[in-house]
Amino acid sequence: MSVIEEVATILDRAAHDCHEVDQFPAGHFTLAQAYEIQRASIARRIERGERMKGVKLGFTSRAKMIQMGVDSLIWGLLTDGMIEEDGGLVDLARYVHPRVEPEVCFVTRRAIDAPLTSLEAVDYLEAVAPALEIIDSRYRNFKFDLENVVADNCSSAGLVVGPWSRRFDGLANAGVRVQFDGRDVQVGTTAAILGHPLRAVVQASRLLHGAGMTLPAGSLIMAGGATAAEALRAAAYVECHVGSGRGALGRVAFTTR
């Protein structure tokens, strides 16, 4: 068995069966191989009946890049099996050690098959929504290096998407507030997402093109965390507000058990 198949099998089983595994040793595989592992792991989900739904970006804040010692974004793949219902109940037993972070989610109206410019990005989008991503590294103690996190599909685990709108003009520096049971746990701004969330669409188009992939119309793009991730606990009402007043993008929420 190749290292690609070996690691993909281990990580897929860890995600599917909700158990943690040790990080693979440095040098066990390269960054390029890590992305191959990611695709091979997702292919196993597809074989079990899940469908591709889009992509997510990671390391979209400069602080996170510096923390991890990298100078570029990372990205993972989304399936319909990761989607949780807005306002619904999220069973934490489905995850290993889940955390949540506020994001902005886009849905495409045209296939993205080439690198886009900032001026072109909006023309490829149908709508935007407030979102919460549930990240869940399968590695023991939530510790990993760059290659390991990419192989683990950039900690992709779940996502909750709020109501869709066409309010692209209010994304530049919208306030972001995450609350547990009505109390603030994270406060930030959409400017933390590459300076403007629409830049995530541009970066996604470049990354996809580099990987020889096309993103079909109707796909989701999770733009990246607007604040640090917050550890989830059982029996919590988790809510995220993006923007305020008449120009607010809206809110998204779920309850844990």
Image (spheres, rainbow, N blue to C red):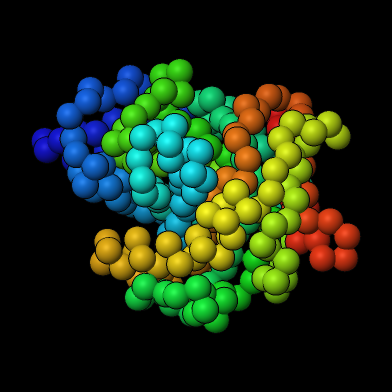
Quarter of the figure with residue 109: bottom right
Q: Which residue is most to the right?
A: 245
Q: Would you say 52 lies left or right of 121 here?
A: left
Q: Would you say 148 lies left or right of 155 here?
A: left
Give coordinates of residue 175: x percent, y percent: 75, 51
Position of the C terminus, as image quadrant, is top right
Give coordinates of residue 185: x percent, y percent: 74, 31
In the rendered image, is residue 58 in sight? yes
Please state which of residues 130 and 196 is positioned toward the viewer in this rendering.
196
Position of the N terminus, as image quadrant, is top left
> Which residue does the image show at 80% across and 33% down from the upper left?
184
In the rendered image, is residue 12 in sight? no
Quarter of the figure with residue 92: top right
Give coordinates of residue 59: x percent, y percent: 46, 44
Please state which of residues 168 and 13 is positioned toward the viewer in this rendering.
168
> Which residue does the image show at 73% across and 39% down from the upper left?
187
Please state which of residues 146 and 48 is positioned toward the viewer in this rendering.
146
Give coordinates of residue 157: x percent, y percent: 50, 40
> Which residue does the image show at 18% across and 35% down from the upper left?
29
98 is higher (above) or lower (below) than 208: above
